Image (tube, helix red, strand yellow):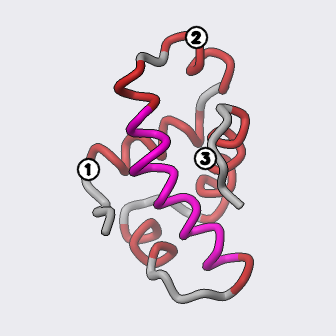
Amino acid sequence: MTELSLENIEFIKILATSDATILQDRMNESTRRRLDDEIGTILREYYLENTRGTQTGWTEKLQKSGIEEDMGKAAIACARRLGIDIS
């Protein structure tokens, strides 16, 4: 199971406040893998919880970490523009 580490929280906040084009230009392979694996998993489960009512617990975890709904939506949108499958 993917954990919500401080690094993951910061990564999600960066996604929520950044332009996907700029991120894509500066992303190395290691960062890309992490986005695909860890962050993608968190955002997918968060998305499913908020759209289909599944009880993943990610909404509460992200809120406790200072990531509110609008930031979560923005992070998902940016991840999608980077080619990460969220649905």
Percent x, y for residue 12?
47, 46
Q: Please tell me the numbered disc located at residue 75.
A: 3
> What secondary structure is found at the residue carrying circle 2?
helix
On the image, which quarter does residue 18 sit in?
top right
Residue lying at 65% horizontally and 32% vertically, measured from the top left: 82
Relative to 32, does residue 80 appear above or below in the rendering? Answer: below
Q: Are marks 2 and 1 in contact (CB under 8 Å)?
A: no
Residue, far top: 25
Q: Please tell me the numbered disc located at residue 25.
A: 2
Residue lying at 48% horizontally and 58% vertically, measured from the top left: 41
Mark 1: give few (<14), some (14-19) or many (20+) Cα within 10 Å: few
> What secondary structure is found at the residue carrying circle 3?
helix
Residue on which disc 1 sits:
6
Q: Earlier in the sequence, mark 1 or mark 3?
A: 1
Boundaries of the magenta span: 33-50
Residue lying at 46% horizontally and 39% vertically, measured from the top left: 35
> What secondary structure is found at the residue carrying circle 1?
helix
Disc 2 marks which amino acid?
Asp
Which quarter of the rendered picture does the N terminus lie within?
A: bottom left
